[in-house]
Image (cartoon, helix red, strand yellow):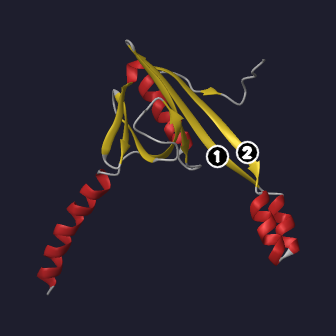
Amino acid sequence: MKRMLAVLLCLAVPITVVAADSNAGFKVTYDGGSLPALKAGTSLRLSVEGNSVRVLNKDAEAATIPAASITEISYGQDVHRRVGAAIGLAVVSLGIGALMALTKSKKHYVGLTWANGDQKGGFAMQCDKNDYRGVLAALEGVSGKKAVNSDAMTVKN
């Protein structure tokens, strides 16, 4: 019985390592841009490697961007109050609904633009609140470009 358990564990551990390796990268949501095969809201995996950035859609490669061709990395937030959730809770409990109206929700967006000869493009992606700093650090590290905070930029019409 002990030998059978040892053999089972010896086979199970390498399989889990291989399965974990296939999910390497950051989970992001495509928000729009110049990748024609993707629609806004599509869940993607962003894999930053030594000399390229790969965008994977369900284990199929949607785009490969050479690190040397990255021209800009931008970062921004969308902050809004949770009014809809507060109204729903106010129906059940007025006090909890009022407290919920005071809370805010943040969405973190990272933009990436590139120019590889005649091929130019860019896209925006929504990152998880726990991953956006890692995405920025990885993109900055592989490209050598510093991320620009788009919230700090003022646009004059």
Based on the displayed image, in which of its 4 quarters is residue 149 positioned? top right
Towards the viewer: 137 or 22? 22
Labelled disc at residue 69: none
- For the residues labelled 1 and 2, say whether their Cβ atoms are less than 8 Å apart: yes
* Residue 42 vertical position relative to residue 140 in the rendered view, above or below: below
Q: Position of residue 55 (x, y in %)?
A: 38, 38
Q: Residue at x 46, y 23 (%)?
A: 121
Q: Which quadrant would the C terminus be assigned to in this image?
A: top right
* x and y percentages locating residue 72 in the rendered image: 53, 22
Most foreground residue, 81 or 10: 81
Q: Which residue is at 46% across, 34% downward?
A: 138
Q: Say whether residue 155 is left or right of residue 54.
A: right
* Picture residue at 23% right of the left edge, 65% below the top: 13
**Residue 48, quarter of the rendered image:** top left
Measured along the vertical axis of the image, is residue 109 above or below residue 7? above
Query: Where residue 37 appears, x then y in whole percent?
Result: 39, 37
The kind of residue tagged 2 is: Val
Which residue corresponds to mark 2?
Answer: 79
Residue type at mark 1?
A: Lys
Q: Nearer the N terminus, badge 1 or badge 2?
A: 2
List the residue tagged with mark 1. Answer: 107
Quarter of the figure with residue 124 = top right
Q: Secondary structure at mark 1?
A: strand
Q: Residue 141 location in percent, x, y?
A: 45, 28
| Residue at disc 2, secondary structure | strand
